[in-house]
Amino acid sequence: MRSTKFLAAAAVLAMCSPAFAQDMASDSTRIISDPLYLTLQGELYGASGWQYGSLNRDNYDNTGAFASKTHVTTNAFDQTFLYGITDDFALHLDWGYDTRDASTHPVGGGDTTRDSSGWTDPEFGLIYRLMDQRADPLTLDLRADYSPDAFSGKSAVADNIGTTARGGQMADFGATLGHEGPMFTIAAKFDAIWLDTAKIINQNNDDVSLTSATWNYRIGLDTQTRLNDLFSINAGVGHTFTNNGQVYNETTGLGHITDGGDVTDLNAALNYQVLADTLVASLQYQHNFYQNTRDLFPTSPTNNSSVRNKDEDLVGVTMRYAFH
């Protein structure tokens, strides 16, 4: 509830900001670093990015006693392409390669380190511009993305590196509604994310864990303020509503409920136009606030556990480019 109120307050503040108040005139220019950017017919857009993440969390046992602390570092390399079929319809591809190092420090010692790396499942999608500021007061985009279960999900163990693929299919259905002015853009986003049953293999004993399919939902607000012809600042806030999942171990027959907890994110970026409307460099930062999570075993409560004080910092750079 606090996160939803925070999003509402952020929207009101953005709309009441001097930039918004002075910039209500519509502008249909398509700026490649802008939240409302969409390729024109025959235009190819690309974004090559790297992001470093640092996550910390505290782990508690079934009695509620502190058990260990975990620190996770990630390196994510991502490539995005967008191609304009028409001025209002574009195809989308996103693919990446991630590495993840997780170190756990239990009470009493006995630290462990687990490493994962691999290709992410590719994501294919389309964007259709239902309303365009060339003819309408606002811009409305409808989005749909699909990610197949292209790579196996394998947990990291002492002697084997894990994978970073989810282990299941994913689909995202979303909409973006916004207004672009000469100096300021504001865009509200909604996404309904379908996560199919995920299959994770334990490489120690070949146990298979299945996590049930579920729907998650995200709302967000993105802005861009153009300071001059060279520099702009993007700022945004989002909240993901995470539903519970059912996890079943096919080998042991043991099942449990996972309460994933919601996530609120704050993000910002500084953009520099290397070549006007052709090449843009961005320096980015994001902080993720995670709610507490729990794993509950109805038939074996001694296995219950929870995670608290979980948060994450992400920094990265992205090069965006367009071939007109």
Image (cartoon, grey):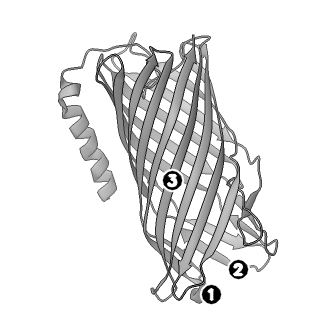
Q: Where is residue 167 in the image (x, y as percent from the top left)?
A: 72, 55
Mark 1, other Cα within 10 Å: few <14 / some 14–19 / many ≥20: few
User: Which mark sits nearer the N-terminus, 2 or 3?
Assistant: 3
Q: Nearer the viewer, mark 2 or mark 3?
A: 3
Q: Position of residue 192 (x, y in %)?
A: 52, 45
Mark 2, other Cα within 10 Å: few <14 / some 14–19 / many ≥20: some
Q: Is residue 172 above or below residue 281?
A: below
SS type, badge 3 = strand
Q: In this view, does 29 lie above or below 123?
A: above
The amino acid at mark 1 is Ser
Q: Mark 1 points at which residue?
A: 300
Q: Is residue 60 left or right of residue 99?
A: left
Q: Name the residue under label 2.
A: 254
Q: Residue at x 56, y 17 (%)?
A: 322
Q: Nearer the viewer, mark 3 or mark 1?
A: 3
The amino acid at mark 2 is Leu
Of the pair 28 and 49, the residue shown nearer to us: 49
User: Which mark sits nearer the N-terminus, 3 or 1?
Assistant: 3
Does the image show residue 191?
yes
Q: Mark 3 points at which residue?
A: 53
Q: Which residue is drawn at 58% across and 41% down?
A: 172
The amino acid at mark 3 is Gly
